[in-house]
Amino acid sequence: MTNPPAPPPSSDADPASSGGGGRRPGDWLLQVALGLFALGLLAIIAIFLIPVLSDGTPGLWLYFAAMLAPLGFLVAIVFTLRSGRRSR
C-alpha cells in the first residue's frame, strides 16, 4: 500500500504565488534600490566620459546624481534587513 500524494500547497502559504504578479509586497523597495543604483552608476560613467568626449567639464548636477549609487545601496541594505527578518 502506498501513501496518497501530498496535496498541493495553498496559495496562502506562498506569497509569490498569489495573483499579484508573483511579487511580495516589499519588492517595490528592491526595485527602487536597483533604479537608484543604476542611475548613480550612469552618472558616474557620464562624469568620466564627458571630459573624454568633449572639452567641457561635468556639471554639478551630475556629481549630485552620482550620489544616487550609494543611496541605492543603502536602500538595498534596508530591503535586505526587512525581508530577512524572521517571523515569530
Image: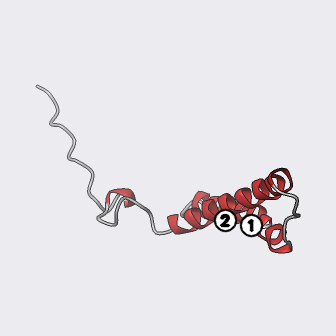
Judging by the rendered image, the residue that carries numbered circle 2 is 36
Measuring 15% from the left and 36% from the top, which residue is drawn there? 4
Secondary structure beneath dot 2 equals helix
Measuring 76% from the left and 57% from the top, which residue is drawn there? 46
| Amino acid type, residue under disc 1 in the picture | Leu
For the C terminus, give its image quadrant.
Answer: bottom right
**Residue 34 placed where, x, y %?**
61, 59
Give the alpha-carbon distance from disc 1 to disc 2, as whole Å: 5 Å
Contact, CB < 8 Å: mark 1 with mark 2? yes
Measuring 68% from the left and 60% from the top, which residue is drawn there? 37
Whichever of callouts 1 and 2 sits on the residue coming sooner in the sequence is 2
| Amino acid type, residue under disc 2 in the picture | Leu
Q: Is residue 57 left or right of residue 6?
A: right
Judging by the rendered image, the residue that carries numbered circle 1 is 68
In the rendered image, the residue lying farthest to the top is 1
Q: Residues within 10 Å of mark 1 (few under 14, many from 20)?
A: many
**Residue 8 placed where, x, y %?**
22, 47
Viewer-closest of 25 and 70: 70
